[in-house]
Amino acid sequence: MKLKENIEAAWDDRGLLGENDVQKAIHEVVDQLDQGILRVAQKESNGWKVNDWVKKAVILYFPIRKMETIETPPFEFHDKIPLKSGYKAKGVRVVPHAIARYGAYISKGVIMMPSYINIGAYVDEGTMVDTWATVGSCAQIGRNVHLSGGVGIGGVLEPVQAAPVIIEDNCFIGSRSIVVEGVRVESEAVLGANVVITNSTRIINVTGEKPVEMKGVVPARSVVIPGSYTKSFPAGDFQVACALIIGTRKPSTDLKTSLNDALREYNVAV
């Protein structure tokens, strides 16, 4: 089956959505996403590559699906996308009331506390999705990541060319932190509690003699806390939120150390 060709054709002409071959192609893409065979984005030798056509298939999945009642007594849902199932065979621990939608890949060893994982997301081996954390559509979460309580990982479907949020291997994302708009957190980085990073958020490295500013990417092994800077407005000067890189994870910091220990190395109150 020519998956990509059928998806691209239907994207350009929605009148094709009624054709059997097109519907089969869309379902096959979502099924392969669910199994981890296809990914919305994957890391290659020259960086991360976003597969736009796979995102298009996810978007096209919605109009060809009908609303259905999903009963998991005593709960009832009414949606177009079924819930993910078969966790025992996948080696995934799922604590009530954790929910993942079909079309999200969840690898073995993942622990889902009461949380939510949306279609198109990829959650790699050994990751903890803690209580009330959310993993948005198409977000890519690496191995041995800890998404602490209340973390919000943003999703993205449209525009199709937009990159998903990417959290690379061995990262700690502190409680109530929010990472959205295609931000990439590189491997082994630590975000303290309440860090909010969008694509326009200033990420300021304050470890040297002069601040170094960047946007959209948290460098590998960075230790990050919430901060603010002064910005002038017509009504006066006010503080605007930013993210401060206050150090780098030391080699002595074990990959499985707690977020608190990683921050205490830099005398940050937790």
Image (spheres, rainbow, N blue to C red):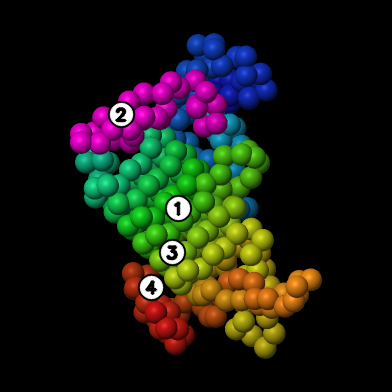
Dividing the picture into quadrants, the one containing residue 90 is top left
The residue beneath circle 1 is 141
Residues tagged 2 and 4 counted as in contact (Cβ below 8 A): no
3D distance between C-alphas at marks 3 and 1:
17 Å
Q: Is residue 42 visible?
A: no
Residue 239 is situated, as x and y percent measured from the top left of the image, at 65, 76
Mark sitting earlier along the chain (3/1) = 1
Residue depicted at x 50% and y 27%: 62
Element type where label 2 sits in the image: strand
The residue beneath circle 4 is 259
Residue 70 shows which numbered tag? 2
Element type where label 1 sits in the image: strand
For the residue marked with disc 4, what is the amino acid?
Answer: Leu
Query: Which class describes the residues within 10 Å of circle 3: few (<14), some (14-19), or many (20+)?
Result: some
The residue beneath circle 3 is 176
Residue 12 shows which numbered tag? none
3D distance between C-alphas at marks 3 and 4:
13 Å
In the rendered structure, which segment of residues is drawn in magenta? Answer: 58-86
For the residue marked with disc 2, what is the amino acid?
Answer: Ile
Q: Is residue 118 magenta?
A: no
Element type where label 3 sits in the image: loop
Q: Is residue 68 magenta?
A: yes
Q: Is residue 214 visible?
A: yes
Dividing the picture into quadrants, the one containing residue 3 is top right
Residue 129 vs residue 169: left or right? Answer: left
For the residue marked with disc 1, what is the amino acid?
Answer: Ile
